[in-house]
Image (cartoon, rainbow, N blue to C red):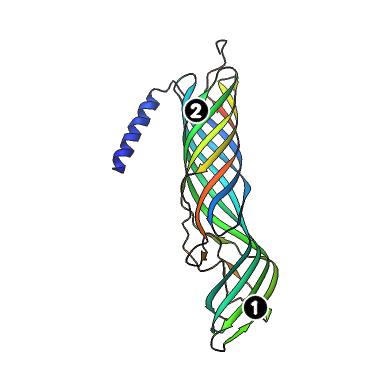
């Protein structure tokens, strides 16, 4: 069934391209802000800046309509935070003694960074004149890679319950028990699934000499699918037996919240501005 759909789509695309009046190329840059639309235990999400490059190809079907595709590369950042997180972990200390590691994190924030190779496919409508309005709509397939997260906390309070002694330790600090302030956790990798996004762009096309044009537009890419793909690790924080004061932040995309993921679903959303130079277009004429 999938093969039939793919073959049919290729035939349809080939038929559209064969009717193209012109084939134009473009090179552009984008400046954007990204966020994840998250369902789960986290309280706040924020947008973070990023940038990218795009190579485009346009199959012009008529004076006003065209089919557009290409490939783009972008660097993305997103951020989430929580005022208070609590949890526990069954682990061992530096001497191999079993205990329950309890923690309370205040002012937790996390920044996700990842790369995106995007393949867009959209339809463009443009008006007339040397300076003209254009609108593009369609979809993009985004291959997300090299995802990593950096996290920090304003304070962390830890303790350890040792069942063999039926006692709880709240000190010493060098053993990983106590209160710690302004903590920067080590960077960790995590996994993201690829994202399918609905795309929309609107802007101004300025025709230039020598069969070229400039595009100045604003765009929005809205994620249609869940991109969470990391294996679940118990809790936001893990105890490090070999270095007790180097606490390991597992990251919100890896962590569990009781019997479920801390981040149950995340959809990638980003938008900003694009500037593109296109060559191969028709020169302005008096009929426009």
User: In the visual, does 59 lie left or right of 220?
Assistant: left
How busy is the neighbourhood of tag 1: few (under 14 within 10 Å), some, or many (20 plus)? many
The reply to whether residue 241 is in sight is no
Q: Quadrant of residue 4?
A: top left
Report, in whole angstroms, how far the alpha carbon at label 1 lies from the one at label 2: 60 Å
Residue 173, how many percent across, how many down? 68, 78
Residue 240, how many percent across, how many down? 58, 74
Q: Residue at x 55, y 33 (%)?
A: 201
Query: Which residue is disc 2 drawn over?
Result: 124
- Tell me: residue 248, above or below residue 144: below
Contact flag, marks 1 and 2 (Cβ < 8 Å): no
Q: Secondary structure at mark 2?
A: strand
Q: Secondary structure at mark 1?
A: loop
Mark toward the start of the polypeptide (1 vs 2): 2
Residue 203, how many percent across, how many down? 59, 29
Query: Which residue is disc 1 drawn over?
Result: 177
Q: Which mark is residue 281?
A: none
- Tell me: residue 25, above or below residue 44: above
Q: Which quadrant would the N terminus be assigned to in this image? A: top left
Residue furthest to the top: 286
Residue 95, how many percent across, how many down? 56, 84
Q: Residue at x 52, y 42 (%)?
A: 222
């Amino acid at each position: 069934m999938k093969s039939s759909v793919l073959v049919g789509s290729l035939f349809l695309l080939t038929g559209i391209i064969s009717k193209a009046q012109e084939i134009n190329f473009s090179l552009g840059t984008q400046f954007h802000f990204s966020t994840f639309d998250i369902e789960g235990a986290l309280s706040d999400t924020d947008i973070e800046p990023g940038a990218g490059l795009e190579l485009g190809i346009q199959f012009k079907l008529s004076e006003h309509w065209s089919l557009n595709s290409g490939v783009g590369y972008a660097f993305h950042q997103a951020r989430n935070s929580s005022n208070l997180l609590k949890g526990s972990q069954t682990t061992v200390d530096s001497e191999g003694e079993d205990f329950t590691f309890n923690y309370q994190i205040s002012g937790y924030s996390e920044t996700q960074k990842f790369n995106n190779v995007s393949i867009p496919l959209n339809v463009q409508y443009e008006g007339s004149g040397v300076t003209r309005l254009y609108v593009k709509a369609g979809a993009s397939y985004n291959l997300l890679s090299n995802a990593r997260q950096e996290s920090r906390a304003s304070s962390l309070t830890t303790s350890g319950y040792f069942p063999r002694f039926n006692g709880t330790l709240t000190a010493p600090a060098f053993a990983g028990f106590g209160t710690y302030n302004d903590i920067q956790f080590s960077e960790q990798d995590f996994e993201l699934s690829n994202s399918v996004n609905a795309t929309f762009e609107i802007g101004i096309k300025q025709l230039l000499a020598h069969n070229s044009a400039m595009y100045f537009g604003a765009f929005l890419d809205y994620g249609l699918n869940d991109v969470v793909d990391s294996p679940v690790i118990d809790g936001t924080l893990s105890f490090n037996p070999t270095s007790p004061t180097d606490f390991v932040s597992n990251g919100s995309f890896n962590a569990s919240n009781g019997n479920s993921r801390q981040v149950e679903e995340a959809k990638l959303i980003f938008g900003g501005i694009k500037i593109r130079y296109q060559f191969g277009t028709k020169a302005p004429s008096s009929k426009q």
